[in-house]
Image (cartoon, coloured by chain):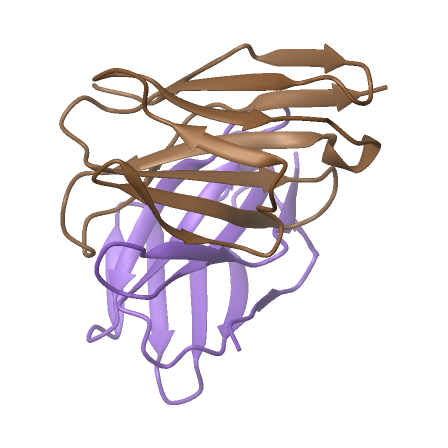
Chain colours: A brown, B purple
Amino acid sequence: EPEVTQTPSHQVTQMGQEVILRCVPISNHLYFYWYRQILGQKVEFLVSFYNNEISEKSEIFDDQFSVERPDGSNFTLKIRSTKLEDSAMYFCASRRLASTDTQYFGPGTRLTVL
Amino acid sequence: GEDVEQSLFLSVREGDSSVINCTYTDSSSTYLYWYKQEPGAGLQLLTYIFSNMDMKQDQRLTVLLNKKDKHLSLRIADTQTGDSAIYFCAESYGSGNTGKLIFGQGTTLQVKP
């Protein structure tokens, strides 16, 4: 069964460093998302992406964050200058086409900022 | 605004039924979802219900939707120790190209042998 994959599974970085989290959505999906979950808290929406552009972003998704689909398969989340409070689990999700299609989540990348 | 609320913890004995409750605020939600998260793992889609349905059954899972009260529940019959996990209720919010999910804070289900 097709699945969303994410790499790395765990990333440790120093405060102020740039990180890139990678996702490979399901191949025939057209809508892509990033969510994050701070330890013990809710899963929060960060950004949605369709047709090579951001379709919606949350208040969390400030100028330090960016997303890109550099080729036909990868979908990346970049944090330019990480802060301690960026430590969280980051989930990528994708859905096929219609708003009625369900979103499928990857296993997540645990980001630890020291 | 958009908000989803769940109780935080539920403990049951193996073989009993578990009922996890959720309330939401967005009356225009088209789909409501239940996701399961095991320790250290990602979000596994368990089931979902379309907003014009009252009930959906899928093997041991029964979803009930009371649209008037904006209340969603997940019943797990014959709960097993392998069902121990965090269960997230989520509503789809927005239409068209967004369709972001708004999650509750999750209910930790503890199943005692």
| B44 lies left or right of A11 | left
| B89 lies left or right of A100 | right
Quarter holding the C terminus of chain B is top right
Name the residue at the bottom extreme: B68
Residue B78 showing in the rendered view:
no
Residue at image location 30% in from the left, 35% down from the top: A94
| B59 lies left or right of B69 | left
Name the residue at the right extreme: A114
From this view, report whether residue A45 is shown above or below residue A12: below
Residue at image location 71% in from the left, 40% down from the top: A38
Q: Work out whether residue A83 or residue B89 is closer to the camera in this orientation and state it.
A: A83
Which quadrant of the structure image shows residue A89? top right
Residue A10 showing in the rendered view:
yes
Q: How many marks?
A: 0
From this view, report whether residue A106 is shown above or below residue B68: above
Which quadrant of the structure image shows residue A105? top left
- Residue B23 position, x and y percent, is 52, 73
Q: Work out whether residue A3 or residue B72 is closer to the camera in this orientation and state it.
A: A3
Residue at image location 49% in from the left, 74% down from the top: B24
- Residue B21 position, x and y percent, is 53, 66
| A70 lies left or right of B37 | left
Residue at image location 75% in from the left, 13% down from the top: A13
- Residue A11 position, x and y percent, is 66, 12
- Residue A16 position, x and y percent, is 79, 22
